[in-house]
Amino acid sequence: MTVYDFAIVGAGIAGASLAAELSAGGARVLLLEGEDRPGYHATGRSAAFWEECYGGPEIVPLTLASGPYLRDNGFLRQRGALYIAKEGDEELVTQFMRRFVPTGASIQHMGRADIQKKLPGIRRLWSDAIWEPVCADIDVAALHARYLALAREGGTRLECRARVVDLDRGQGEWTIAVAGGETFRAAVVVNAAGAWADELARIAGAKPAGIVPYRRTVAQVRVDPPVDEDLPLVLDIRGRF
Ligand SMILES: Cc1cc2nc3c(=O)[nH]c(=O)nc-3n(C[C@H](O)[C@H](O)[C@H](O)COP(=O)(O)OP(=O)(O)OC[C@H]3O[C@@H](n4cnc5c(N)ncnc54)[C@H](O)[C@@H]3O)c2cc1C
């Protein structure tokens, strides 16, 4: 039985990109996905915005570092983002600027007249905003497919319908059991199980990090007349939408 250098559990964007990078370096990589195709969960359902402030100031350096690769390879389409605030929310706008300006994110404070230009017809009660010009749509499907293709070219073995149910470490390597009874062996197991990372950690006997899978709700609204395709991403400064 092949002993892989790395067994990566989860073939979302995290697992696929890591498989591509590791196999390019010559490692023998096994990519195990519980669903019948890669990208079925968060990666396939993302709203797909490259938004510099997403995730908080600690994440901004990672987001900024990813920009050149994504832009140079045609995965981004610039749209811009607007964090909008109502009268009375001035302190939140100030706090937001204070938190994110030092990170190097491209944010600018914007007054009512400019908000109206970006969002024609917006109600007057939205009086303040923060404009992030470089926010972009990410072509997530293309990016994910590219990483899967690079992984394949590098010799990664992808197994779908391979939900890891047991992990046992003995004599310097892992024995990995998947639902259905098949087993694999690897020197290193990588937890790229997304929202189920804690479940996998428990199976491996590692300490869970407090990650809980949640459902999220998306409402799609068709309006007449249709909205301009180039409107910015619009976010409430209080984070409610
Ligand atoms: C509705 C929504 C909107 C979002 N919008 C944005 C956005 O606009 N911009 C942005 O940057 N991010 C956004 N995100 C976040 C982004 O989608 C995620 O951070 C990213 O996709 C996570 O990738 P991942 O590979 O870690 O997880 P996932 O894509 O969830 O992949 C984990 C994989 O692990 C597999 N797995 C789990 N347990 C096992 C097991 N035991 N055995 C085998 N396989 C297993 C799962 O089946 C899954 O395929 C959004 C997320 C959601 C849900």
Image (cartoon, grey):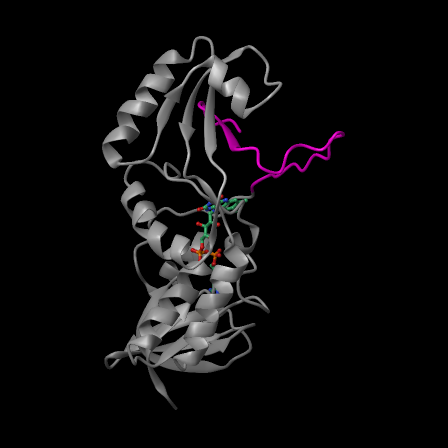
Percent across and percent down for residue 24 are 33, 76
Q: Residue at the location (53% across, 21% down)?
A: 117
- Residue 175 position within the rendered picture, expressed as x and y whole percent measured from the top left: 36, 79
Quadrant of the frame with the N terminus: bottom left
Magenta segment main secondary structure: loop
Q: Is residue 198 visible?
A: no
Residue 48 visible in image: yes
Camera-side residue of 69 and 145: 69
The region drawn magenta spans: 216-241
Residue 196 inside the magenta-drawn segment: no
Q: Which residue is nearer to you in this view: 85 or 12?
A: 85
**227 on left or right of 95:** right
Residue closest to the eye, 37 or 75: 75
Q: Residue at x 51, y 26 (%)?
A: 240
Residue 218 inside the magenta-drawn segment: yes
- Which residue is pictured at 28% across the width and 76% down the height? 25
Left or right: where 205 falls relative to 75: left
Q: Identify the residue shown where x is 49% and y is 74%.
A: 178
Q: Looking at the image, is 230 positioned above or below residue 90?
A: below
Q: How many marks?
A: 0
Q: Is residue 55 above or below residue 82?
A: below
Residue 147: x and y, percent?
A: 44, 67
Q: In which quadrant of the rendered view does residue 203 lie?
A: bottom left
Question: Whole-percent x and y of residue 78?
Answer: 47, 43
